[in-house]
Amino acid sequence: MSLITMKELIKRAEEKNIAVGAFNVANMEMLIGAVTAAEKLNTPIIIQIAESRLAYSPLYMIAPMMVEAAKKASVPIAVNFDHGKTRENILKALEYGFTSVMFDGSSLSLDENIRETNAVAAVARNFGATVEAELGVLSGNEGEGDVAKSLYTKPGDAVLFADKTDIDCLAVAIGNAHGKYVKTPNLQFDILKEIHERVDLPLVLHGGTGISPEDFQKCISLGIRKINIATANFEACMTGAFNLFEGEGPRNYFTMNEAMVESVRETVENHIKIFSFM
Ligand SMILES: [Zn+2]
């Protein structure tokens, strides 16, 4: 049984001076691709789904599949509910056995974010689950659309937020964004450095798709311990199928399944290698 909490994987990443990859999945093929990559590289990962994706991947179907995949994997895997917005769905995810939840109160005022984050944390603690929260606004939407602009996390707010909330890790906005970057992201390393120096919490980078390997590793050196990859996985799944239909080989459901799994596996492996300095 390899289902583990996100907190334990972040601790491991801290000890090794690496980051743990958190890969969004939406169907069985993406899930198999991500788990196979982790097993092949013998490296723990986090698998996650965002609340906004439940319209496509109903929680009552995808959640048991994710939790069972983690339990049966040969490497430790944490299962995270990404960008939880409603207490109802956060509670459901915990009941299905997710070992961590992210509460996204980034659109709330600082005071409201603190209050709501603590309310979610109190519920999560009953399940022994890890809690991630977010401060600062990331633009865009995982897996779709282009990126406009973000509001950077204010280091002073981060200090206050960390002090007033019961959380295990904090997602920051430093010029990263969800979706596909229109141009190379200009990450504000000085902001990240200041937050890292002043806040005693592991930090999380969302919107990882499109950030260069060098910038990923610089972020890790400045306290990022968890990196979310969503868009690249959705793209990989789609591209795997697309290339199959463009190619000359046999086209049927089974070759499509294999193409999607392989494409996601390759993408996840590439990111694990960067995050682990392999
Ligand atoms: Zn995110």
Image (cartoon, grey):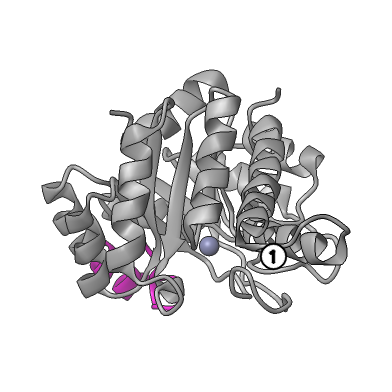
How many numbered badges does the structure rendering display? 1
Residue 220 in view (yes/no) = yes
Residue labelled with disc 1: 238
User: Viewed as shown, does residue 157 lie left or right of 256?
Assistant: left
Position of residue 122 measured from the top left corner of the image (x, y, whole percent) = 15, 56
**Quarter occupied by residue 81:** bottom left
Q: Is residue 16 above or below residue 53?
A: above
Mark 1 and ligand 1: say if the CB distance to the nearest ligand atom is below 8 Å.
Answer: no
Quadrant location of the C terminus? top right
Q: Which residue lies furthest to the left in this view?
A: 126
Highlighted range, magenta: 103-117
Q: Is residue 148 above or below residue 71?
A: below
Q: Which residue is drawn at 50% across and 39% down?
A: 35
Position of residue 239 measured from the top left corner of the image (x, y, whole percent) = 75, 62
Three-letter code, disc 1: Met
Q: Which residue is drawn at 28% across and 50% down?
A: 98
Q: Of residues 219 and 45, which is closer to you in this image?
A: 45
Q: Which residue is drawn at 56% across and 62% down?
A: 153
